[in-house]
């Protein structure tokens, strides 16, 4: 017949073995998840780099000016358009 201390030690060793087994596989799972996250981070950083380059190209002033000239029928502002006809309404103290 086993002594009680031997039985307690056996149960403790079995419990620790099971705990170690569980922790080991949980760590492996977390490492796999971390690897996936790191790969996704690199992919996202590459996409951000491409988007920044694309934005830089799309916002070039020369390119925007050429497109505006091609697609918009804009004319220079005349003095009649720049100077309001009712100047009294815009002066401080003027009747509104």
Image: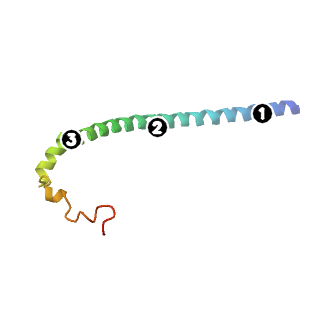
Q: Is residue 2 visible?
A: no
Q: Is residue 75 above or below residue 33?
A: below
Q: Secondary structure at mark 1?
A: helix
Mark nearest the camera among 2 and 3 is: 3
Please report whichever mark, 1 or 2, sits nearer to the chain's N-terminal start.
1
How many angstroms separate mark 2 from mark 3 (CA)?
38 Å
Image quadrant holding the N terminus, namely top right
Query: Badge 3: few (under 14), some or many (20 or more) residues near its Cα, within 10 Å?
Result: few
Q: Which of the pair 66/54 is nearer the observer?
A: 66
How many angstroms separate mark 1 from mark 2 (CA)?
37 Å
Say left or right for 56 vs 18.
left
Q: Position of residue 80 (x, y in %)?
A: 14, 59
Q: Is residue 88 above or below residue 53?
A: below
Mark nearest the camera among 3 and 1 is: 3
Q: Is residue 83 visible?
A: yes
Query: Badge 1: few (under 14), some or many (20 or more) residues near its Cα, within 10 Å?
Result: few
Q: Which of the pair 2/24 is nearer the observer?
A: 24
The residue shown at (15%, 49%) is: 68
**Badge 3 is on which residue?**
61
Q: Position of residue 66 (x, y in %)?
A: 14, 44
**Badge 2 is on which residue?**
37
The residue shown at (53%, 33%) is: 31
Mark nearest the camera among 1 and 2 is: 2
**Badge 1 is on which residue?**
12
How many angstroms separate mark 3 from mark 1 (CA)?
74 Å
Q: Position of residue 19 (x, y in %)?
A: 68, 35
């Amino acid at each position: 017949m086993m002594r009680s201390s031997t039985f307690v030690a056996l149960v403790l060793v079995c419990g620790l073995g099971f705990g170690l087994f569980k922790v080991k596989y949980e760590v492996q799972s977390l490492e796999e998840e971390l690897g996936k996250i790191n790969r996704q981070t690199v992919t996202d950083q590459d996409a951000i780099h491409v988007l920044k380059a694309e934005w830089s190209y799309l916002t070039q002033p020369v390119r925007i000016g050429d497109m505006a000239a091609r697609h918009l029928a804009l004319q220079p502002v005349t003095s009649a358009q720049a100077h309001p006809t009712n100047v009294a309404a815009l002066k401080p103290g003027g009747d509104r």
